[in-house]
Image (spheres, grey):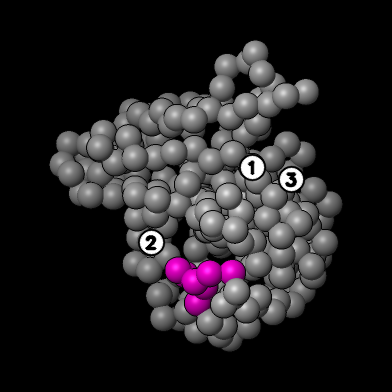
Amino acid sequence: MPFLLSSYVTLSSSPATFSVRTPGLVPTGIAPVRVPPLRYVCPMPICVVCAAWGHGPLCPECRSQLRAAKPVMRSGLVVSSGLFHEKSARRLVHLLKYQGLDAAGVVLGQIMAAQVPPGVSTLVPVPRAWARRLRYGVDPARVLARRVGAIAGVEVVEAVGAEVWWPSHAGSDRSSRRPPEFRLVGVVPPGSALVDDVVTTGATLAAAGRITGIHQALTATRADCPSFE
């Protein structure tokens, strides 16, 4: 059956109740899936991305920059991403990843929860290298997995262990990326999906998939690489 995905994002600053088990893909002829309304994440009405007063959690300008991303294949895994890694979405990821801003994780978690693949009952975060976790004080995949799990009602199992350090992949092309080495530190239940903040080539997710046997993943954003276009 042919499928389509919404090419737009509808966000609201008002609190709302929404279904988070709606799959990211829908049969043609059915209303396109939209990113769910976002709830306030702090007492003050400010934009998480640009700090504009009177708009929360995202101002109209920052909301307009978000583009929904459809599921794709990356290094043998089916990857569902909430947004393209650009503009406001990239800023949200960086605020969480490099500044440890919890509000950014809350916003991304709400968007990701609406894209949890059907049949997934467990989320397995792909851990950050220990050196960067200590440097920045946050493991973004773990934060996102817990946020999504709380909203979607699925379990989070930290079954993958990380190395102390590996070269950063941010901004590098596929030829210069060395897949990190992970180790299995827990039991991976059936119906699991990996969780990470960003996917580009899928090398990191594939490395985690090899030791867990997981073939699907959920990420906050997708940064497209020219070799895949």
Residue 229 image offset from top left, x and y in percent: 58, 50
Whether 173 is among the magenta residues is yes
**Residue linked to disc 1:** 71
CB under 8 Å between callouts 3 and 2?
no
Nearer the viewer's eye, disc 1 or disc 3? 1
Label 3 crowding class (10 Å Cα cut-off): few <14, some 14-19, many 20+? some
Q: Amino acid at mark 2?
A: His
Q: CA distance from mark 3 to mark 2?
A: 28 Å
Q: Is residue 221 left or right of residue 58?
A: right
In the rendered view, tell whether residue 170 sits above or below residue 47.
below
Residue 20 in the image, given as x and y percentages of width and height: 59, 33
Kindly report the secondary structure that dominates the magenta region of the rendered protein.
Answer: loop
> Which residue appears at 73% of the width and 36% of the height?
118
Q: Circles 1 and 3: CB distance less than 8 Å? A: no
Residue 102 percent across, percent down from the top left: 39, 57
Q: Nearer the viewer, mark 3 or mark 2?
A: 2
Determine whether label 1 and label 2 are within 8 Å by CB. no
Residue range highlighted in magenta: 168-174
- Tell me, yes or no, if residue 173 can be seen here: yes
Q: Residue at x 34, y 49 (%)?
A: 87
The picture places residue 50, in percent across and down from the top left corner, at 23, 49
Query: Which residue is under mark 2?
Result: 94
How far apart are the alpha carbons under marks 1 and 2? 22 Å
Callout 2 crowding tier (Cα within 10 Å): few <14, some 14–19, many ≥20: some
Q: Under tag 3, what secondary structure?
A: loop
Asked if one can make out residue 36 in the rendered structure from this viewpoint, the answer is: no
Q: Residue at x 56, y 85 (%)?
A: 165
* Badge 3 amino acid: Ser
